[in-house]
Image: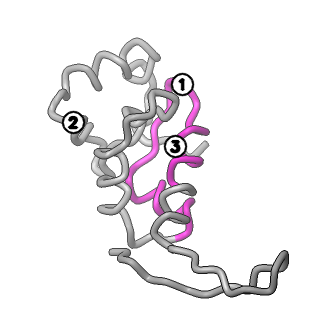
Amino acid sequence: MFGFVIETRQDNHNGKNKLMFKKEDFKRKVLEVVKKIPRGKVLSYKQVAAKAGNFRAARAVGMIMKNNHDKNVPCHRVILSSGKLGGYNGNLGEKRALLRAEGYFKQKFLISNY
């Protein structure tokens, strides 16, 4: 999983070293990937992790989704690799209803590769 790995980078504006937390960078990338999943399509946690740059971080994606409160990020479009829906902050019925409303269950293939 990812932790608080710190790397230093040279800040071009004032010459000082700038600390960058890879964790926050990965989180930002995950949220960007999930925002781009079209209505009626889904990706697995593993696919999101790979698109965000770390194919081994599927569990980290799950934690990011669990802790996300931004309604602009369609967390319900991220499911398990097995095709099962997985969690949705304890409200699996709501996740199922959102995906049904978007037409996900009418499709032949479960996991998209948009």
Q: Nearer the viewer, residue 88 or 97?
A: 88
Closer to the chain start, of discs 1 and 2, is 1
Vertical comparison of 53 with 5: above or below? above
Disc ID at residue 61? none
x, y (%) of residue 102? 46, 17
Vertical comparison of 18 with 52: above or below? below
Magenta span includes 48: yes
> Which residues, given as a range, are shown in magenta?
30-53
Outermost residue, right side: 13
Magenta span includes 34: yes
Residue found at x 35% / y 46%: 65
x, y (%) of residue 44? 40, 49
The answer to whether residue 76 is left or right of residue 90 is right
Residue found at x 58% / y 80%: 19
Vertical comparison of 61 with 75: above or below? below
Asked which secondary structure carries label 3, the reply is helix
x, y (%) of residue 67? 31, 46
Task: Name the residue that disc number 1 marks.
Answer: 39
**Amino acid tagged 3:** Val
Closer to the chain start, of discs 2 and 3, is 3
Q: Nearer the viewer, residue 90 or 38?
A: 90
Q: Residues within 10 Å of mark 2 (few under 14, many from 20)?
A: few
Q: Nearer the viewer, residue 42 or 76?
A: 76
Q: Residues within 10 Å of mark 3 (few under 14, many from 20)?
A: many
In this view, the mark in front (1 or 2) = 2
Residue found at x 81% / y 80%: 14
Q: CA distance from mark 1 to mark 3?
A: 11 Å
**Amino acid tagged 2:** Asn
Disc ID at residue 89? 2
Task: Name the residue that disc number 3 marks.
Answer: 34
Closer to the chain start, of discs 1 and 3, is 3
